[in-house]
């Protein structure tokens, strides 16, 4: 990459634009955990027909009480239903959010692969990036990847 290809040196933007960027990041962080849970629950249901708290904890590498607390929050938000002795199931809203999160992950991972990132690294990096990119950026990733195939 040549110097003329680089963006100009950063300049301090006005306070309103600056705070808008930080608000966007905070909102993405808030939603990141929710999206990770619903996406995992959808995957577990697809694989085993249900998502059990113990399986969620094992996949996320957290303790079961942590999962129980988050599932309570997801239920209060209308994203999951918990059935005694049957596990956790997504509501329509939870399923829609899982589909959206999975699609964002697919777009980011495909973009990284198109850049030459190894499959394992692309999968892991996409897991973090997917929550922090705008619709505009996702569309650019999609166009870039489509142009290369």
Image (spheres, rainbow, N blue to C red):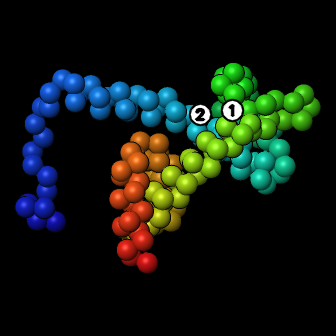
Give the image location of residue 47, x and y in percent. 79, 54
Examine the rendering and report whether any part of residue 117 can be seen. no
Q: Please indicate whether residue 49 sits to the left or right of residue 145 in the image.
A: right
Q: What crowding class fits label 1: few (fewer than 14 Cα within 10 Å), some (14-19), or many (20 or more)?
A: many
In the image, residue 2 sits, relative to residue 49, either above or below, namely below
For image coordinates 73% across by 32% down, the residue present is 80
Q: What is the x, y in percent for residue 68?
A: 73, 25
Q: Which mark is residue 141?
A: none
Residue 93 drawn at (x, y percent): 67, 37
Q: Choose top left, top right, bottom left or bottom right for residue 53.
A: top right
Label 2, on which residue?
Answer: 34
Tell me the residue that label 1 is attached to.
79
Extreme residue toward the right, this view: 85
Element assignment for label 2? helix
Q: Position of residue 127 (x, y in %)?
A: 51, 48
Q: Are marks 1 and 2 in contact (CB under 8 Å)?
A: yes
Q: Could you give the CA–CA distance between mark 1 and mark 2, rounded to whole angstroms?
A: 9 Å
Q: Is residue 101 visible?
A: yes
**Point 14% across, 31% down: residue:** 13
Q: Quadrant of the N terminus?
A: bottom left
Q: On the image, which quarter does residue 20 sit in?
A: top left
Specify which label sits upstream in the sequence, 1 or 2: 2
Location of the C terminus by quadrant is bottom left
Rendered position, 64 above or below 3: above
Q: Residue at left 79%, top 31%?
A: 81
* Residue at the farthest front position: 92
């Amino acid at each position: 990459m040549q110097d003329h290809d680089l963006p100009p040196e950063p300049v301090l933007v006005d306070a309103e634009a600056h705070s808008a960027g930080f608000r966007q990041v905070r909102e993405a962080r808030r939603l990141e955990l929710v999206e990770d849970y619903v996406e995992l629950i959808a995957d577990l249901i697809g694989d085993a027909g249900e998502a059990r708290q113990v399986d969620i904890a094992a996949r996320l590498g957290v303790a079961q009480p942590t999962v129980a607390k988050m599932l309570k929050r997801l239920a209060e938000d209308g994203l999951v239903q918990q059935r005694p002795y049957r596990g956790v199931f997504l509501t329509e809203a939870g399923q829609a959010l899982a589909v959206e999160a999975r699609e964002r992950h697919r777009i980011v991972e495909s973009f990284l692969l198109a850049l030459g990132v190894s499959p394992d690294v692309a999968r892991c990096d996409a897991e973090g990036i997917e929550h922090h990119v705008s619709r505009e950026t996702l569309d650019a990733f999609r166009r870039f990847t489509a142009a290369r195939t």
